[in-house]
Amino acid sequence: MIQENVSLKPFNTFCVDVSARFFAEVSSVEELTEILNLSNDKKPVLFLGGGSNILFTKDFEGLILKLNLRGIREEIIDENEILITAKAGENWHQFVTYCLEKNYGGLENLSLIPGNVGTSPMQNIGAYGTEIRDVFESCKVLNLETLETEIFDLERCRFGYRDSIFKQEAKGKYVILEVTFRLTRKNHNINVEYGAIKTELENMGISNPTIQEVSKAVINIRQSKLPDPKVVGNAGSFFKNPTIPLVQFEDLKQKFETIPGYPNGDFVKVPAGWLIEQTGWKGKQIGNVASHKLQALVIINATGNATGKEIFDFSTMIIDSVKEKYGIELEREVNII
């Protein structure tokens, strides 16, 4: 059941060739608890989903557990709402497609995001004006200390921008087994406020879109500027969009008139992609690593031969450049191992 010295190249979207000292795939909660009971001497333990938000900078000396828990179930609440529960190992985009085919609304703006369902609450994945917390009902988790299951509701998850309790004080203490979403069956809340979606729908000749058409617009946008991990190694957006105090933004505006910002109370969110592009990194390649030519937020394994350390060092150079020019410190969105 537990293998030794296994290459992780097929299991991370950066296609970094590192190995795990111990490795196992699990397809049920029973298998998972059994392995955890047997593996006390194989610490640390790392749980792997789709491998789309992780950067391995070295070999992993503990146990990696690949979660292949599968299954979807439905519970109708009323004529307009339904609870959909997906196991952690379900592919995210395939799950979104499943919901759209049944005309369940709420996830359409999150189409084509790489990864699995189980990791979606960890960083409160979001895109084009929608976040997981907007449709989240609860998730079932395994407490790694007691090996008992628990339920985390919306409040307990403490979602923030690309953040949750699972990235803070609960980090490493639980593994998510399944996630339940509250979606609509009829009266869908169509969210097309994000400018790029509006523009794409206009290009498609659509003025009153369905949730399926919103999804198609999102897919068109993502495919036009984001590289396919199956073609070139990447983890999607590498950095979070920084939020800075309004006073700091106004000072920057005096010096950099075109700097974009999205106010939120006493703070302003600044697009990280713009900052990276303005510091000359968009499309730039050093050795095996590059910033994508169409989206500066995405770092790619340009040659297919990059090490995790090369990618990490490249990201550090970007962070240093942005901080030197704008006084803003970018934060990595990708988990560094």
Image (cartoon, rainbow, N blue to C red):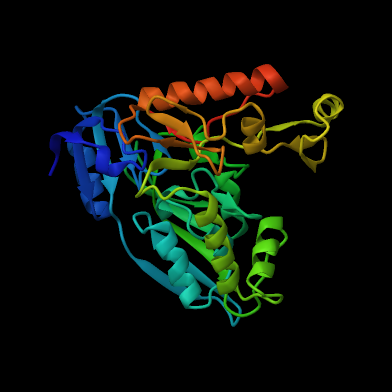
**In percent of the image, x 59 and y 18: which residue is there?**
320
Q: Which residue is drawn at 36% across and 48% down?
A: 231
Q: Answer yes or no: is residue 106 visible.
A: no
Q: Is residue 150 left or right of residue 211?
A: left
Counting labels gives 0
- Residue 232 screen position, x and y as percent: 37, 43
Residue 74, placed above or below residue 297:
below
Q: Nearer the viewer, residue 148 or 315?
A: 315
**Residue 228 visible (yes or no):** yes
| x and y percentages locating residue 324 in the rendered image | 66, 16
Name which residue lies at 80% across and 30% down.
249
Left or right position of 217 against 64: right
Image quadrant in which the C terminus is located: top left
Q: Position of residue 294 (x, y in %)?
A: 55, 44
Residue 206 spot, x, y in % from top left: 67, 75
Q: Between residues 104 and 282, which one lies in front from this camera angle?
A: 282
Location of the N terminus by quadrant is top left
Residue at horizontal 63 percent and vertical 33 percent from the top: 277
- Image quadrant of residue 295? top right
Q: Residue furthest bottom?
A: 79
In the image, is residue 104 above or below residue 40?
A: below
Q: Residue 259: name its quadrant.
A: top right
Who is closer to the viewer here, 273 or 189?
A: 273
